[in-house]
Image (cartoon, rainbow, N blue to C red):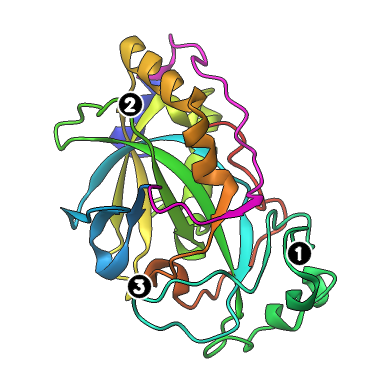
Amino acid sequence: MTDVFDSLINELQPKPKAIKSAVDIEPTEVMDDPDQLRLSLRDKVFRIVGGVEEELGEGPLKIVVVKAASISRIYYENEYINGETKPPTCWSSNANSGVPAKEVPQDKRQSTACFNCPQDIKGSGQGVSRACRFQQRIAVMLANEEGVLQPDQAYHLPLPATSVFGKDQKKMGLQTYARLIDAQGALLSSIMTEISFDKSSDIPKLCFRPFRVLEEEEIVLVKKVQSDPYTKTLVTSIPKLYVDNNLDMDDVFDVVEGEGVYVKDA
């Protein structure tokens, strides 16, 4: 393991699981919230969008994951048009459940179950990809370049499959990274995480690595943001989704058995 992880493990030894929050949450409500702040990955540049757009640069970016939804699936019937906003045609709130969400209109459901859905067949999307894509919605707090946590605000970060899966420990997706943190007896929300774009990828793909363990006073701030009802909506609402490049890229990943919903506690 890298020196970063070695030092992290040593630092975690005396620290208890300081934060407990139920975050294995399914996105359920369909809503259009123009005030919902999110991080865009478009063109491999971090941006805050929702209201006035603010460019944060190419990263790396330091964050704290405060909530996470179950891995979900989402399908758009029509081809992506740059800058267009539209609701998904069909979706599953929990990839492990394998059925369309109850909020999906009957005439829009592509199948009664995901396993026999025509949109889940390789080649149903562009190239060998599947038309119905995996994603995971997380809520994060931001820190500045020096790693100083910015209080009292959470942002929605929608992760495409390329940023969720993948077992390369040098370029960890969220699931692999969360498992490594959990193996040390820590919660993801007790760690400041550094995210960066995989420079070898043609599409916006995030890599996760630890930056440092949070101090007790920072944990107080994180708990405050976690308990805010607005933070929950960041991972439970499925808006009339902005179809962003980072969600519309062709995903060629399959869900490995047992990887479906791992991040149960941030």
| Residue under numbered circle 1 | 100
Q: Amino acid at mark 2?
A: Asp
On the rendered structure, is 250 left or right of 124? left
Asked whether disc 2 touches disc 3, contact meaning CB atoms under 8 Å apart, the reply is: no
Q: Say whether residue 17 is magenta.
A: yes
User: Which residue type does callout 1 highlight?
Assistant: Pro
Q: Which residue is mark 3?
A: 203
Label 2 to label 1: alpha-carbon separation: 34 Å
Q: Residue at x 33, y 58 (%)?
A: 40
The residue indicated by pointer 2 is 152
Q: Disc 3 to disc 1, how far (Cα)?
A: 27 Å
Along the line of sight, the residue nearer the viewer: 146 or 185:
146
Taking the magenta stretch, the answer to whether it contains residue 165 is no
Camera-near label (3 vs 1) is: 1
- The residue segment tinted magenta is 11-36
Q: Is residue 238 above or below residue 132?
A: above
Say which element carries label 1.
Answer: loop
Prevailing SS of the magenta stretch: loop
Neighbour class for label 2 at 10 Å: few (<14), some, many (≥20)? Answer: few
Tell me the distance, in whole angstroms, between the alpha carbons under discs 2 and 3: 31 Å
